[in-house]
Image (cartoon, helix red, strand yellow):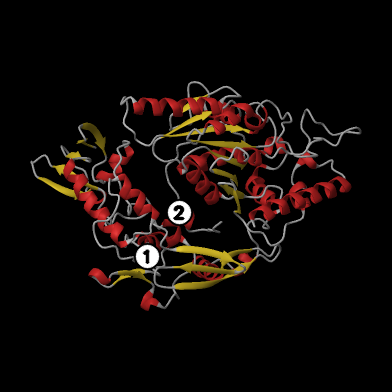
Amino acid sequence: MVTLTIDGRTVQAEEGAMALDVAQEKGIYIPTLCAHESVTPYGACRLCLVEVKTAAGRERLVTSCLYPVEEGLEVITNSERILRNRQTIIDLLLARCPESTVIQDMARELGVEKSSYHPEDHGNCILCALCVRACQEVVGVSAISLVNRGVEREMAIPFFDDSTACIACGSCSYICPTSAITMEDSGGVRTIRMPNNETEFEMVPCKVCGNYWMPRKQVDYISRTKGIEPEFFDLCTTCRD
Amino acid sequence: MQNYTVYVPRLTPKKEPFAPGHRACVGCGEALAVRLACKAFPPNTIVANATGCMEVISSQYPMTAWRVPWMHALFENAASVASGIEAALKALTRKDKRPDNGTKVVAMAGDGGTSDIGLQALSGALERGHDLLYICFDNEAYMNTGIQRSSATPFGAWTTTSPDGRESIGQKTWKKNMAAIAAAHDIPYVATACHSYPHDLMAKVAKGIAVPGPAYIHVLSVCPTGWRSAPDLSVRLGRLAVETGVFPLYEIENGEYKMSLELSTLRPLQDYLKLQGRFRHLSDDTIKEIQERVIKEYERIKERAR
């Protein structure tokens, strides 16, 4: 355990825990869009910026989701300087995603009503890589990734075209903070819409009630990796005994 | 509703504001529903809980299962207490006595505390337009005191005060439509949910808290003790209630109906009834009568959602 101060409050925390997690646990609010407890921190959105001062006296601005706490650390989460930096970041995000209600709400919260940059609608994706991390770390199939660099960076399936690895579980659409990825089931077809492409997946019907309940590729994936007979998935969870 | 299986549950919030180790019966659907609802709460949430199962099982002196600020109210006034909290927070913020940190207020009650005893308090809170979420956990009778009938008990169900026998088929009246009563107050958000559809329930609670103004969510919670069903069937019974059309899942946003789960065909009612001892005495004729009514009601809601 180490002792540190956050906004003047002395708190105890596990050594190596990230400053953002410690602050949230103590009920201190830090805005963020790309942090999620189920995946490793990544530092994409930069909104969780805080000022830190180490015991040795070094001061700087860091992303709290990636900064491990240490003995004697002083963290400030809401100074004028931090607010100015956050406003610039959300201003840029607002110019990128002017239609996203999540970004609009966050901007309003940080005191930015209208972007001062020329808005260029890039859809709702903010390149936070939550979907990529969830697909890799939680689902374990790595069907999507961020490709290219700089202004051309985007979230995509391989070659913008190949969804062979995807098992249509929908984790990416669930975790997406700005609803840039959506999932829709209708009549035996699951459609996953990503910023760059739209893919349709076949659903498996239950042999008794006929309700479509799981994507075919997910059945194949689970039976292949876990050694379960595909017949196990013939019945939906309601019809199973 | 999104049909998430296997992988997405690993991404749901890991916090447990409703701690395990409480004294609910084995297979309690209501405890499951409360646990899921609490997971969807934003960081600063205050709960006002009416008397009922959830209060009794979660707060036996000197212990508590609540990791959120929680207040036990009387049977009838969860909505009044919640409105009081909300008004007090607003007043303190106005007088600069506390920072505006987005604290939300949630009221919880059972079906008795909502549709019988607490109805006028609820109606008042909805009409005054307080920014709160009211969740009714409906297990279809007064289970805590020993399975007495409430106005939410469905037609034909056995309870200790609506026994079946030569002269009686059990509950003689139809279930009160609380969601429609709440919607009649012209509030921004009304929804029905069930613990057997956890992502749907969590999404609705989060939405209900986020909307400005009052919101009402009616959650069907299976009660193995009172429904005389096997405890391991609680989740399945919830699914069957929805899939047979007995308890359709829908949202009413600013008066607009929207079905949460589109069913192409309804399951036969018998699938749902035969698993519960409280419907064991029903004759085929009565089941047919209930089936017709269920289909009629379901079609009516579907029609409104069109």
* Three-letter amino acid code of the residue under disc 1: Gly
Point out residue A104 in the picture as x, y percentages from the top left corner: 35, 52
**Callout 2: 10 Å neighbours few (<14), some, many (20+)?**
some
Q: Chain of mark 1?
A: A
Q: Secondary structure at mark 1?
A: loop
Residue in view at x 88 percent, y 47 percent? B285
Q: Nearer the viewer, residue A148 or A106?
A: A106
Between tags 1 and 2, which lies in front? 1
Point out residue A118 in the picture as x, y percentages from the top left corner: 26, 63
Residue in view at x 43 percent, y 63 percent? A181
Quadrant housing residue B279: top right
Residue B10: mark in rendering: 2
**Left or right: where does residue B19 sit relative to residue B228?**
left
Query: Mark 1 highlights which residue?
Result: A123
Q: Nearer the viewer, residue B222 or A178?
A: A178
* Three-letter amino acid code of the residue under disc 2: Arg
Point out residue A59 in the picture as x, y percentages from the top left corner: 11, 44
**Left or right: where does residue B104 sit relative to residue B225?**
left
Q: Nearer the viewer, residue B151 or A75?
A: B151
Q: Chain of mark 2?
A: B
